[in-house]
Image (cartoon, grey):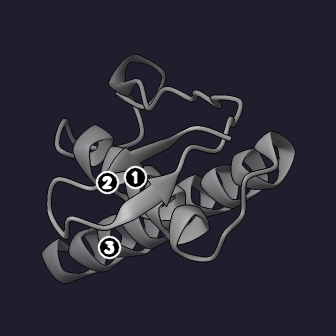
Amino acid sequence: MPTVIDETTGDVVEVVQVEAVASVASINSLASEFPPEAAKAIEQAMVWAINHCNENGITDPEQIREVMLKARSDMKTHLRMQMTDLRSQQG
């Protein structure tokens, strides 16, 4: 396997081929349910999931996808709870 020099640490790092997994947090499909900033929160949750997989050596695209979708689902649940709390405080 080829290697590269890590620009941050100077370490020699082996290059590992991985497949990319993509998912989109579109506010268009969530507009009726969440405020506009919800898309950013969902995106950040999914980015966290990718970083979590990377830190834990998870490289299987299907596993990464599952972690991303779980993070997305968990964030949507969290946002729904916040919306419910806000509505109950207003009423």
Q: Which residue is mark 3?
A: 82
Residue 83's image quarter? bottom left
Q: Secondary structure at mark 2?
A: helix
Residue 21 location (% of width, % of height):
65, 31
Mark 1 near mark 3, Cβ–Cβ under 8 Å? no
81 lies left or right of 65:
left
Q: Which residue is mark 1?
A: 47
Q: Residue at x 43, y 74 (%)?
A: 81
Q: Which residue is mark 2?
A: 44
Q: Residues within 10 Å of mark 2 (few under 14, many from 20)?
A: some
In the rendered structure, which amino acid carries the disc numbered 1? Val
Q: Residues within 10 Å of mark 3 (few under 14, many from 20)?
A: few
Mark 1 near mark 2, Cβ–Cβ under 8 Å? yes
Quadrant of the frame with the C terminus: bottom left
Q: Residue at x 56, y 44 (%)?
A: 15
Q: Nearer the viewer, residue 72 or 61?
A: 61
18 lies left or right of 23:
right
